[in-house]
Amino acid sequence: MSGMSSPVEFLELLAREAATVEFEGPLVAARSAGLSADRIAELERAKTVALRVRALLERRRRRESELSGLYDTVRDLAGLRDLDDVLRAIVHRARHLLDADVAYMTLNDAERGDTYMRVTDGSVSARFQQLRLPMGAGLGGLVAQSGAPYVTANYPQDERFHHTREIDAGVSEEGLVAILGVPLRLGSTSIGVLYAANRSARPFAREEVALLLSLAAHAAVAIDTARLLAETRAALAELSAANTTIRAHSSSVERAAAAHDRMTALVLRGGGVEDVTAAVTDVLGGSLLALDAEGRRLARVGEIDEPDRAEIVEAVAASRTEGRSVRRGALWYAAVVAGAENLGALVLHPEGELADADQRILERAALVTALLLLFRRTVAEAEGRVRGELLDDLIARPLRDTDALRSRAHRLGVDLDATHVLVAVGEDAIAATGSARQRVLSWATTYASARGGLAAARDGRVALMLPGRDAGASARAVARDLSRITGRPVTAGASGPSTGPASLAAAFREADRCLTALVALGRAGQGASSAELGFVGLLLGTVSEGGEADVRRFLTTTLGPVIEYDARRGTALVRTLEAYFGVGGSLARAAEKLHVHVNTVTQRLERVGQLLGGDWQHPDRALEVQLALRLHRLGTAEG
């Protein structure tokens, strides 16, 4: 029986890339064999994990396929010989990468004022293949006219577009329903549209729109390069007298081709932004600065002063609007974008004037930089997910295979047997949604990874496992840095030191309780460890088995009669004591805070004296009473 329906079967299914439905096989066999409920539950968990791994592998295969398609497109451009072949390859890749039924491209006709079908892939209708779309008509005519991408899950029923009889007839004969169209842009001019379409209703994801925009950018580069080559040949044939001008233009084209080849090679061998900046300055000369979306430096070659932040923002916005590099004084700016997302900018200080082809080199460098940044971010996000899943497994589930956890950690460069502290960050850090929330988690992942630790989102909070022994110092550093990132106070509780994977779950719970204690004790926006809470740590820590009993005994001895009196009579003696001590022992201010008459406060405090003894306001007793009040409030907050 032990060899039947074991979790290993799911690994075998993953190894042979089995279909999703086949993962039910081991469970069906287990139930047929009459295995126990625990064994079946174990197989259910194994199936769930295996399906998650299968989904992750499928997403990675798709991403690799998309990047491979982009790289193949860049390689085709480097060896450009026939424009039609390159455009057909781009349209074919668009259909393949977006898993669409049909992909096609239209180009604008300046003389006739419309846009016509240039290349199709997957089309079966001759009428559709010969369509011409007036500017503003249909989805494609609107994209060609506006220069903005448009998408519809059901074109025949979408009233946003101007339907014409000819267009609707061609679309109907082809059987198209869902259509995505993005513009082909040269600088600020739209020269055509690239489409992906399906014969059934289907929404297109944002990532698919960005991917098609990238392919459209490559198609525009191919058309532009072909135009430049044609202009060069015409100039050589027709302007033989202008030999100097021809040489200068030819040299710029050669520089563009050389730069294109070099940057293509950079992409293929996995180079970085530093390599791109070095390649551009080698070709164009001068100095180059690469900035991220926040204006921080990514790389710099040569002596160039960083421009004013306001100038950067204005120039990058202009470059994005115009779709090409722009000049501001002695500097040239090229926006680094991916679809509608701003990733940064390249700032060039050339040695002399830039020719048009030289500007294209800078723009293509910006495009390559965007590809590299997207790839680097994808890798970082994947690693962050893996690291977060490992920490979640360590602190959220009973540990069954510590050797496997150690092996996973070792592959990430983390030693689980080293000494670590656990830090829990409060909801005040991740209360925001969307990009702000993601920025906090991304910061925590980077912060922990740089120190050989782990980070993960957990039950509305962020957990960090950091190497070291000083839990309090780690909590304060996290609270300080995250407060600076979020622009508001952030609370962080910590515990430790802790050694070994088996101790991490308890350490996180202690850090989480420490975080709750800080808020309950009025220390929100600070960082501390449970050990630093002093006597309050008895309620939180695991110093001894009798720790919680000590707290209860202290509370009962110091404040028990008052608490019991409130519970029995429904009075507010505890709240009156808190108000009284909170205003420094002033009867009048306590009455004002409680919204009662001062005589009422006096009567309540007399009752407290009867319950606790007449010396309850003496300094030593008063200190114990205030501490007991804090502990009582903390226990109520946690309960």
Image: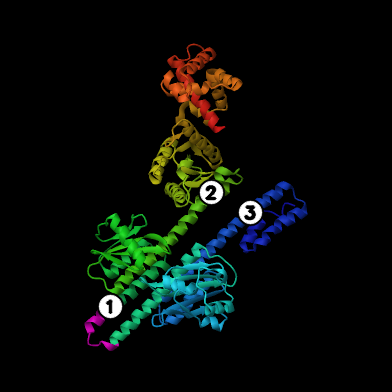
Location of the C terminus (image quadrant): top right
Of tags 2 and 3, the one toward the viewer is: 3
Residue under numbered circle 2: 390
Which residue does the image show at 47% across and 67% down from the upper left? 211
Q: Which residue is mark 1?
A: 251
Provide residue 93's location: percent of width, then percent of height: 50, 73
The percent coordinates of residue 141 (x first, y second) are 46, 74
The mark that comes first in sequence, 1 or 3, is 3
Horizontal side of residue 368 vs 169, given as left or right: left
Q: Name which residue type carries label 3.
A: Thr
Amino acid at circle 2? Leu
Quarter of the image for residue 622 reads top left
**Is residue 239 inside the magenta stretch?**
yes
Does 181 appear above or below 376?
below
Specify the segment rendered in magenta: 237-252
Q: Position of residue 422 (x, y in %)?
A: 48, 40
- Residue under pointer 3: 48
Q: Is residue 253 above or below residue 334?
A: below
